[in-house]
Image: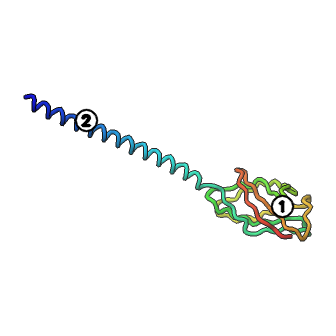
Amino acid sequence: MRIGLRGLVEVVDVVLLVLVSVVGVVFMYLWLIYYIVKTLDVVGQIVVFEILKIEAAKIDTGTNTATLYIRNVGGVNVTLSNIYIFRLDSTDPLCVVSVNETLYTGELRKVVFSVGGCSIQPGYDYVVKVVTSRGAEFAVVVSV
């Protein structure tokens, strides 16, 4: 009778060991799935950044205007906030122009603004930087 009871205890030990192992694997699986879902959720948020392409730019010193052709190639609508003009060899802006134009996804927009107070001189290169309301920056070099 003692031999049969000893065999039963070993079987119960093995069943408990398997049960604890299965519970551990289930908890590890649930944690891994939770981690992957959270990581993909963050990646999904990163994908919708603002992306603009400045396809053409011109500064006309005769009319004191600048013209930009800007295309929204990102996944969200973009609101332009400010446009800065720098000399290529400087970090101080010559002027800041406030704009409030929304570019919808896939839209190409012609943006014309005055550069009368910027002291633009022919024969120099200038950097035109467009800043969005969310703080994204896009720049192009323009020869005058």
Q: For the point 10% across and 28% down, which residue is it? A: 2
The location of residue 8, given as percent across then percent down, is 15, 33
What residue is drawn where x is 76% and y is 53%?
81
Frontmost residue, 89 versus 4: 4
For the C terminus, give its image quadrant.
bottom right
Q: Which amino acid does label 2 sit on?
A: Leu
Residue farthest to the left, as pictured: 1
12 is higher (above) or lower (below) than 51: above
Q: How crowded is mark 1: few (under 14 residues within 10 Å), some or many (20 or more)?
A: some
Q: Name the residue: 90% across, 59% down.
A: 118
Query: Of callouts 2 and 1, which one flags the residue occurring earlier in the amino acid sequence?
Result: 2
Residue receiving disc 1: 113
Left of 4 or right of it: where is 62? Answer: right
Q: Of helix, strand and loop, which one carries label 2?
A: helix
Seen at 92% across and 61% down, the residue is: 119
Residue 112 in the image: state x and y as whole percent. 81, 63
Left-right relation of 133 to 143: left
Residue matched to label 2: 16
Per the model, the C-alpha gap separating discs 2 and 1 is 77 Å
In the picture, the quarter occupied by the N terminus is: top left
Image quadrant where residue 140 sits: bottom right
Residue 45 higher or lower than 71, as above or below: above
